[in-house]
Amino acid sequence: MTLLTPQILRFESLPSTNLEAARRAIEGAPEGLCVVASEQTAGRGRLEREWLSPEGAGLYFTIVLRPDIDQSAWPLLTLMAAVAVSEALLDSCALQTDIKWPNDVLANDKKLCGILAETVETSIGRAVVVGIGINLTNHAFQNELNKVATSVEAVTGQRPDLEGLLEALVGAIAKYYQMLQTPDGREVIIREWSRRSTYASGKRIRVANGDEILEGISRGLERDGALRVETADGDIRIVRTGDVSRVRPASN
């Protein structure tokens, strides 16, 4: 197991930090290459959704990884990244967060950070680029999203130190990526994720996957990071893809 040695490349503007990192991975970029941009003109989230990325309003970051672990554990890379974001925000901004399965980082039940991991075929083997977008100010999203999105500045009342957050994030990724590669790495990452997430177990949730809607109670994670959901009839359904939302109690 090799230790992650991050190298940061900075750009004023990019279409997407994931696209730039993928291009460099294909060209043979080493593991640990980090791409950071002040703005993205074509940022993307999960399910090909647009990720608005105006200049100076967020931390737009992607790291190249070349995991030397069984590919069945690769889905845990997004959970690992969410844990790292959660720790970095706590350490650098004193901000306590929640994680909604699989990898949305929340504050006050609103989305603060999105994570997108993509595999890339390269001449020296398959790589993964893990993109992280953290809303630093409310300029990071449109006003109509105020009910579902938030920012570090909105929650803490202070404009965050981007460089301090970036340093904490890179350090946390290196730490938890190393943990994932240990013999009991799967269990460690799932445990670290679960203790930071109110969605891990005992929460009434709704999962939307295309036209299929599943409701039930979250009952922890499988070894590959899939979500276990107990339905009304007591069956356990295993969810590997879909959008999760909290089901609020009906008001009287």
Image (spheres, rainbow, N blue to C red):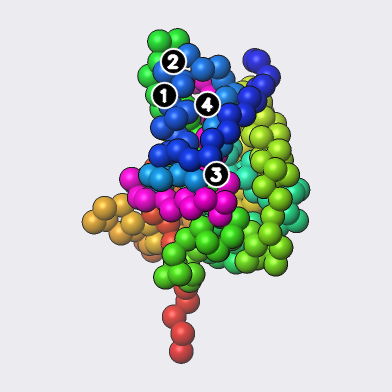
Q: Return the disc, 1 or 4, that comes first in the chain's sequence.
A: 1
At horizontal 39% and vertical 54% (from top left) the residue drawn is 243
Q: Nearer the viewer, mark 4 or mark 3?
A: 3
Few, some or many residues within 10 Å of mark 3 (<14, 14–19, 20+): some
* Residue 5 lies in quadrant: top right
Label at residue 27: 2
Q: Nearer the viewer, mark 3 or mark 1?
A: 3
Residue 88: percent from the left, percent from the top?
69, 45
Q: Is residue 21 above or below residue 222?
A: above
- Could one spot residue 103 in this view of the protein? no
**Label 4, on which residue?**
64
**Amino acid tagged 4:** Val
Query: What is the spatial separation of the Cα atoms under label 2 and label 4, in whole angstroms?
Result: 12 Å
In the displayed orientation, state which residue is furthest to the left: 211
Magenta span includes 12: no
At horizontal 62% and vertical 37% (from top left) the residue drawn is 189
Q: Return the disc, 3 or 1, that comes first in the chain's sequence.
A: 1
At horizontal 41% and vertical 45% (from top left) the residue drawn is 41
Q: Is residue 238 above or below residue 181?
A: below
**Amino acid tagged 2:** Glu
Q: Return the disc, 2 or 4, that comes first in the chain's sequence.
A: 2
Q: Nearer the viewer, mark 1 or mark 4?
A: 1
**Residue 159 placement, left or right of 39:** right
Q: Are marks 4 and 3 in contact (CB under 8 Å)?
A: no
* Residue 241 lies in quadrant: top left
Q: Are marks 1 and 4 in contact (CB under 8 Å)?
A: no
What residue span does the magenta drawing correspond to? 48-74
